[in-house]
Amino acid sequence: MKLIGVMGIGGSGKTTFTEQLDKRENVGVIHVDNLVGEMKRKYFKIFLQSQENNTTESTKNNPKLKSGFKKIFYKNKFAFKFLMAVRSKLIEKELNKQIDEFKSSGKGVIVIDDWALPIHKKLFPKLDHIYTVERNYLSRRKGIRARDALTTEEVKITELPYALKFFKSTTGSNTSIITNNGSIEDLQNKADLEYEKLGELTFEEKYFVKEKIDLRKATHNLNRNNLKQPEYTNLK
């Protein structure tokens, strides 16, 4: 069993990458943002934006915080560090629970999708491989605005930790950079290739024929292209 991490700035394409991996029967995916959303609704409901501002698929799972509240913590590096520590602690139990459930069900690959992976001090060193998804700045900003219905100001607030260089892409032999050029199909193909590299293919995935062969058509082409017409001998 392999424990995999997928990280990257908001809007980079992490969800698309992990959802493609999730199509594999042998893979279990944990979207940490969904756990954070549950935590917000439980402990920080007073700080959430009104319900009508949380109507996209993403913000339904992980509601947006009020801009003023975010500014307080996102503009100060130490306050932000404290917020992230609280975030990690509150979701730690549920995160470990989901990991154990996937292990018990026999999943060969467990993928953890979280832009803030390094803050999980106990979990981060246990990851067998870490993928960082990167995307062009303007393309990423456009994508995240559409995905979460964010204003330009809200996007700027979200990006402050990265401007402060609080988080950096990981380096090492167990890390990979996945470049998102804006094409969903290309990103999905990259996810498939990386899954195959992990070496956890099931028997069906190794030997399953993706396209059924039309035997009649194949036989016709074989006769037409490879076999000579039979010669008939006059026996008279």
Image: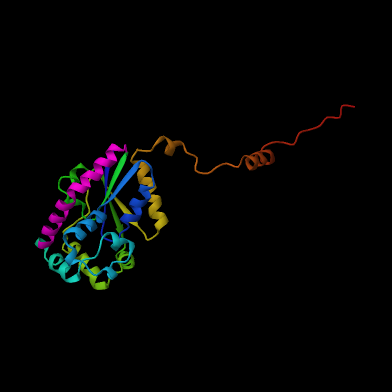
Residue 24 in picture, x, y percent from top left: 38, 44
Magenta-span inclusion, residue 130: no
Q: Examine the residues drawn in magenta and state their main secondary structure.
A: helix
Is residue 42 shown left or right of residue 134? left
Please, which residue is most extreme toward the right here? 236
Most extreme residue toward the left, as rendered? 78
- Compare residues 234 and 161 and report the one nearer the observer: 161
Q: Is residue 95 magenta?
A: yes
Q: Is residue 221 above or below residue 50?
A: above
Q: Quadrant of the C terminus?
A: top right
Specify how the rendered protein is coloured: rainbow
Does any portion of residue 40 appear in the rendered image?
A: yes
- The answer to which of 209 and 169 lies nearer the viewer is 209
Residue 128 in view, yes or no: no
Name the residue nearer the viewer: 184 or 44: 44
In the rendered image, residue 104, in percent from the top left (x then y), is placed at 28, 37
The magenta segment: 79-106
- Residue at x-position 21% and y-position 44%: 96
Residue furthest to the top: 235
Estimate the x, y position of residue 214 in percent, counting from the top left.
60, 42
Q: Quadrant of residue 81?
A: bottom left
Name the image quarter holding the N terminus: top left
72 left or right of 169 in image: left
Marks counted in the figure total 0
Question: Where residue 47 appears, x then y in whole percent?
Answer: 17, 66
Looking at the image, which residue is at 53% across and 44% down? 211
Q: Viewer-proximal residue, 23 or 164?
A: 23
